[in-house]
Image: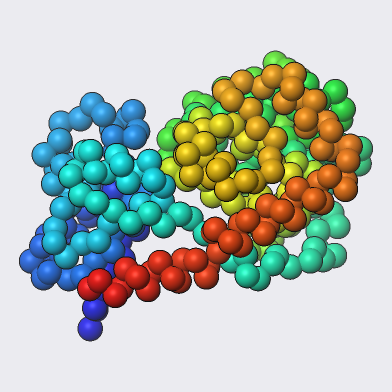
C-alpha cells in the first residue's frame, strides 16, 4: 500500500551503490511518486571524484525520472544539481522545532561538567560535529588557546565513516597548543542512560544546555545542522563564513561571531566581549531564536511539504 517514497540522501551520495541502483529501478518500473531529498552530492566530495563507476553515478545519484521531485537543502545545491544533472529542485532547508522551545535543564545535569572532564573554573566550549576534516576543528582549538582564560573544548561526535587520521591530527594539535580537548562521543547519545562500564550518558541537548559557547568553524557544509541547533538551544556561536552560510543563512540577520577562513584578533576580541557580557548574549540568542522560528521551523517545513505533495 505504499503511495509515496521519500528517499533521504540514498540517491545522492554513493555510500551504497547497489541500494541507489535498486531504488532507481523500482521508481522507474513502478512510476512511484517520489521525493528525493538530497544532502551531499558526490561531486561535492573529493573522495568520490576519481572512480570507475561514473555511469552508475550519473544514472542514479540522482536519477532523473518523471515521477521524482527533487529537494535540496540550499540554493547553492539547487544550482549545482541543475548544472550537473539538468533537473530543477525545490529548496527546503533543514529545520528544528522552534515552535516548541527546549526543556529547562534538570538535576540530571549536575555531574555533567565533571563527567566531560571540566574543572570548576573552565568554560565549556562545545564543538557539536563529527571529527572530519571539513569541520575545521583546528580553528576551534586555536580560538580556545587565544581566549586567554580557562576553557575546555568538548567535541561531541566521533569521526564516523571518514577514518580516524584526522581525529589523531586534532588530538595532536590540541596537545601541541596545550588546549584541553575531550572527545565525548562515548557518553553522548539520543537518550539518557548508562554505559556498560557505569558512566552516565547525556544527550546532545544536555551538553548544549550547559555550553558557554558553540564553535562551528566548518569550511564546507551542505547546510548547517549544528548552526540551527545552537540557535535553537540559545547558545552564542562562533561560525566560519562557509559558502552556504554566506549565501543562504547570513542574509537572514543572525547575530553570531563570524570569521572568514582564519581566526583573527578581531574574532578573539568579539568572542571575549560576548563571554563577558551576559545581557548581550541574551539579546543575541533571543533575536536568533525569533529568526530561526521564522525561517527554519516545522511550520515552514509543513507548508513546503504540502506544496510538494499537491504536485503529485
Q: Position of residue 260 (x, y in %)?
A: 59, 25
Instruction: Return the residue found at the far bottom.
Output: 1
The residue lying at 80 percent from left, 25 percent from top is 269
The residue lying at 24 percent from left, 78 percent from top is 3
Instruction: Return the residue found at the far left.
Output: 29
> Image check: 216 left or right of 312?
right
- Compared with residue 4, is residue 245 higher up or lower down, i.e. above or below? above
> Image check: 36 left or right of 124?
left
The residue lying at 88 percent from left, 46 percent from top is 278
Q: Position of residue 101 (x, y in %)?
A: 69, 67
Q: Which of 82 and 166 is in front in this view?
A: 82
Q: In which quarter of the image is residue 153?
A: top right
Question: Can residue 114 be seen in the rendering of this structure?
Answer: no
Q: Where is residue 121 in the image (x, y as percent from the top left)?
A: 91, 37
Question: Can residue 219 be seen in the rendering of this structure?
Answer: yes
Q: In which quarter of the image is residue 69?
A: bottom left
- Compared with residue 28, is residue 12 higher up or lower down, i.e. above or below? above
Amino acid at each position: 500500500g505504499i503511495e509515496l517514497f521519500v528517499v533521504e540522501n540514498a540517491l545522492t551520495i554513493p555510500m551504497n551503490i547497489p541500494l541507489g541502483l535498486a531504488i532507481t529501478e523500482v521508481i522507474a518500473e513502478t512510476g512511484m511518486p517520489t521525493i528525493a531529498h538530497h544532502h551531499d552530492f558526490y561531486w561535492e566530495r573529493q573522495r568520490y571524484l576519481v572512480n570507475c563507476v561514473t555511469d552508475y553515478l550519473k544514472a542514479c545519484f540522482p536519477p532523473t525520472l518523471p515521477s521524482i521531485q527533487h529537494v535540496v537543502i540550499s540554493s547553492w545545491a539547487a544550482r549545482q544539481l541543475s548544472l550537473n544533472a539538468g533537473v530543477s529542485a525545490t529548496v527546503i532547508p533543514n529545520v528544528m522545532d522552534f515552535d516548541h522551545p527546549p526543556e529547562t535543564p534538570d538535576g540530571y545535569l549536575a555531574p555533567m561538567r565533571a563527567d566531560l572532564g571540566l574543572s570548576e573554573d573552565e568554560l565549556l566550549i562545545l564543538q557539536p560535529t563529527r571529527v572530519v576534516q571539513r569541520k575545521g576543528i583546528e580553528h576551534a582549538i586555536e580560538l580556545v588557546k587565544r581566549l586567554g582564560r580557562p576553557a575546555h573544548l568538548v567535541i561531541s561526535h566521533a569521526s564516523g565513516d571518514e577514518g580516524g587520521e584526522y581525529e589523531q591530527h586534532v588530538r595532536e594539535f590540541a596537545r601541541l597548543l596545550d588546549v584541553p580537548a575531550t572527545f565525548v562521543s562515548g557518553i553522548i547519545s539520543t537518550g539518557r542512560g548508562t554505559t556498560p562500564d557505569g558512566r552516565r550518558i547525556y544527550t546532545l541537548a544536555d551538553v548544549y544546555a550547559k555550553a558557554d559557547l558553540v564553535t562551528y568553524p566548518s569550511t564546507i557544509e551542505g547546510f548547517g545542522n549544528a548552526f540551527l541547533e545552537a540557535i535553537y538551544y540559545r547558545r552564542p556561536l562562533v561560525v566560519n563564513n562557509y559558502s552556504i552560510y554566506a549565501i543562504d543563512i547570513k542574509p537572514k540577520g543572525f547575530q553570531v561571531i563570524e570569521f572568514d577562513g582564519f581566526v583573527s584578533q578581531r574574532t578573539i576580541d568579539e568572542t571575549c566581549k560576548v563571554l563577558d557580557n551576559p545581557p548581550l548574549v541574551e539579546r543575541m540568542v533571543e533575536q536568533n531564536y525569533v529568526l530561526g522560528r521564522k525561517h527554519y521551523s516545522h511550520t515552514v517545513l509543513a507548508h513546503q511539504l504540502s506544496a510538494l505533495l499537491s504536485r503529485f
